[in-house]
Structure formats: C-alpha cells, structure tokens
Amino acid sequence: MTSDMLHVSGNRLVTEDDTPVRLRGVGLGGWMNMENFVTGYPANESSMRAAVRGVLGEERAELFFDRLLTSFFTERDAELLAGLGMNCVRIPVNYRHWESDERPFEIDPRGFRHLDRVIGLLGAHGIYSVIDLHALPGSQNQHWHSDNPTHVAAFWQHRHFQDRVVHLWEVLADHYRDNPWVAGYNPANEPADVTGRVVGPFYDRLVKAVRAADPHHVLFLDGNTYATDFSIFREVYENTVFVMHDYALAGFAHGGPYPGHTRGEWCDRDELERTFAKRSRFQRETGTPLWVGEFGPVYTGDPEKDAQRYQILRDQLAIYDEQEVGWSLWTYKDVGLQGLVHAAGPYMERFGGFLAKKRRLGADRWGSTMEEAADVLGPLHELVETEFPGWDPYPWGARYQSDDLVRHILFAQALLPEYAELFRGLGDDELTALADSFLLERCVRREPLLELLASNLAG
C-alpha cells in the first residue's frame, strides 16, 4: 500500500491530490513514554526505571523494558486498529530514548529502533502516525506524563533544555522527512509555561528549525496550559494543525454523574458542545484544521457509571462528526483504567495487590477520585483553605495542587521501592512473561468500547 504525504489545505488535511483525510484514531500512551496509570507503576518513568534497575541490575532491567516495548505493540495491534476503521495513531515518546541528561546533545540512534518498527507496521495497514514528544528535558509541564518528578516545569526556565529539544527535533525531522506514513510532528505535548511568555518564542524558533530539516511534514502544535490556550501564538504557521485537548470534566476518575454535576459544575451534551466551541475558537478564527489530540473518559468498573462514561464518549464523537473534527482517543492499552484493551496474566497477578494499594491511596492523578484517604487528607485540605484562602496556583488551583504534592508526588515516590521489590528474585523467563502480559493476544478487550468505536468509524 502506498501513501501520499499529508499537508494542510485551508481547514483540512489532504493528500497530494487534494483528497481530504480526517485523522481518527488512538494514542499509544505508556509505550515509548511510560505512564504510571498505564502500566501501574508509581511516580514518574525515570524514577521508576532507576528503582527497577536498582533491583534487577542494568542488563536485566534492559531485558524487561525492551521486551515490554516489543510486546506492547505488534502487528496484531495494528490489525486491530485498522479493523476498527482507524487511520491514525498518535505516538508519545520520551526524549530519553535518544539523549541522556548526562550526555546532552549526543543522539543514541537506538531510539529509532522501536519507533521505526511501529510506524512501519501502522503504515503497512494504512494507518498514519503522529510523533508526539511527550516528555521534554526539564519537563514542559507540571505532571508525571512529562516524566516530571516534581511540580515545576523547568523546561521554560532554562534555555539549555530548549536548545536540546530543538536539536532533537532536527534529528527526528531529518530521519522521517521522506516517510509518507508519518502524518506529522507534535513537538511538545501539553506545554504549561506558567508565565506564558516563553512558549510562543520557543515555538517560533522550533518551527524554523524543523522546517529547515523537513519542509514538508505537518506540524501539530499544542496550545499552552495543557493544549487549551492558543493566545500564545503570534502567527499562524503554514502547514500546521493547532492541537486542542478536550477532556470532559464528568469523565475524569472524580467525575460524574453524567448528565449531572462534577464539583459544582454541570455537564451534559450541550455543555460538552459549548466547551468544545470555546476550546476550538482559535482554529475556527484562523481557518485551520480541527483536530483533538487527546480526549476520552476514565472507566471505573461500575457498570452504571461506565455506561455514563460511554455516553460521554458517544456525545463527544457525535459533536466531532457533525463538525468534521479529527481526533485521537486516549489511550490504546493499559492495566484497566482507560484502554481499549488491558493487560492480563502474570503482570496483573504479580502487581495486582500493589495496584489495589495505589488505588486505595489515590497515588496517581489519572486514577484518583481525590477522595481516597479522606479521613487523613481532608483536614489538610481544610487547613490549606482556611490558612491560605487566596492561594490559587497554576494550573488548576489549591485543591489540585495539594493532591499533586501529597498523593501524586509524596505518596507515589514513597511507593517506588515497593513496586521495584516485586521484581526481586525473578528469572529471565519470568521477566519476559511479565512483559508479554501486554501482548494483544493475552489482553482483555473492553468490548463495549471497541463496539462503540467500530460503529462510529463505520458511519
């Protein structure tokens, strides 16, 4: 199968013969950028890898992590996504696959091995890839998914980090410049520049550098404050999609009911549409394509609540269909919170008790209801509200910040040794079996979600 290089024409993506292409698919979260809720570990990726290396040693840790990369996505996964009718996968990657903090600017070509493999598998099944740099040196946002062990987005404070990302993207763009199955480049997932003054000039510089290395591929640029604020763009770059993220408040772990109130805010289909209209205003005003880089509810295991989550998804997809919006659902595969499929077998048997403890403590944001251990943390939140009534930290206020600092950093980092110890004493075959728990043929399929997506994509 052959492909044309995509490009932007007005408010559409089109092939070289001007055939419109509406990119609809899924994000490959937790693969080349590991996330705590996806594979069940606590805290951030680099801290987890260091803890596991401390138990297994360098070589055996590499055996496990490389096998996980191999098993997490194979041709069977590409076949499943193509069978659903998807034509796009957004692939999050961590800069650490190409460059280490100890040796900045020195590119390790081994970083391309798995990414090339999966882009090739997807292309063979007629599926485009969007390469998404999800974790930047110094962390471009305040949370775990940028491999941030703190709550400080230091990327915006140090020119050194920005220089490294420009250099890395020059390398990535040069490597993929002639690959027509790469739809384009998403250079910085969910930037969160507190001042709002650095991100715009950084994009100006980055766009020029990438265009010099590869003048043809589409750029997919996230707005500031987690892909919601587009006021930072000082010009509309050519051949560019300005990417919004569109998570519904009622669809978070702490959300619901739907329709109904979540933390005092009403959410129903009309509100979803109003929120989307606000989030997409910049794209409409500039006449550029509408593409939602991330969205999707979190599932609970409660049939009644999950039925409401599926309705949120149906309503969002209906809105996107009515307005010819492209989208990338978050996320494809995990340990049971949100994925189309989730791991089973030895990994879940080994780590099931640990996952239960992590849920009980609410120790990762994406799975936290913000009410776990309320008898202990409730007084802390009351104290903060009483003593610091005017405190409103970026990006989402005092309650979220307190939870981030206590649950998702302090508790999560305290859990790291316990997670790593579960690898102790395992032989090579056992490590391989853990990684192979993520093979599609060993996963459990979330059938209602798969049926919902297949029906939508067939329409």
Image: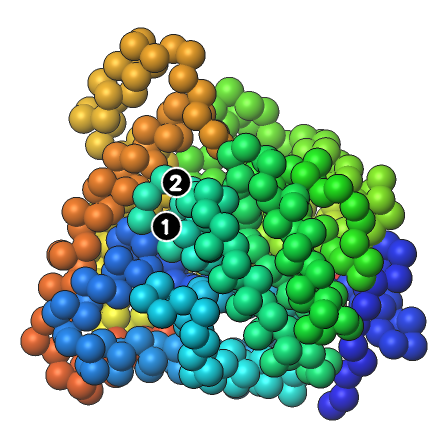
Instruction: Give percent across and percent down for residue 200.
Output: 65, 44
Relative image position of residue 234 (x, y in whole percent): 75, 42
In terms of image quadrants, where is residue 80?
bottom right
Quadrant in the picture for the C terminus: bottom right
Residue 207: x and y in percent read: 69, 59
Could you tell me which quadrant the N terminus lies in? bottom right
Query: Which secondary structure lies at badge 2?
Result: loop
Horizontal and vertical percent for residue 18?
91, 71
Left or right: 324 in relation to 347: right
Residue type indicated by callout 2: Val
- Determine the image quadrant of residue 173: bottom right
Mark 1, Cα crowd under 10 Å, few <14 / some 14-19 / many 20+, is: many
Mark 1 in CB contact with mark 2 (< 8 angstroms)? yes
Residue at mark 2: 152
Q: Amino acid at mark 1?
A: Asn
> Disc 1 marks which residue?
148
Residue shown at the point (68%, 73%) measured from the top left: 213
| Residue at left offset 35%, top offset 63% | 101
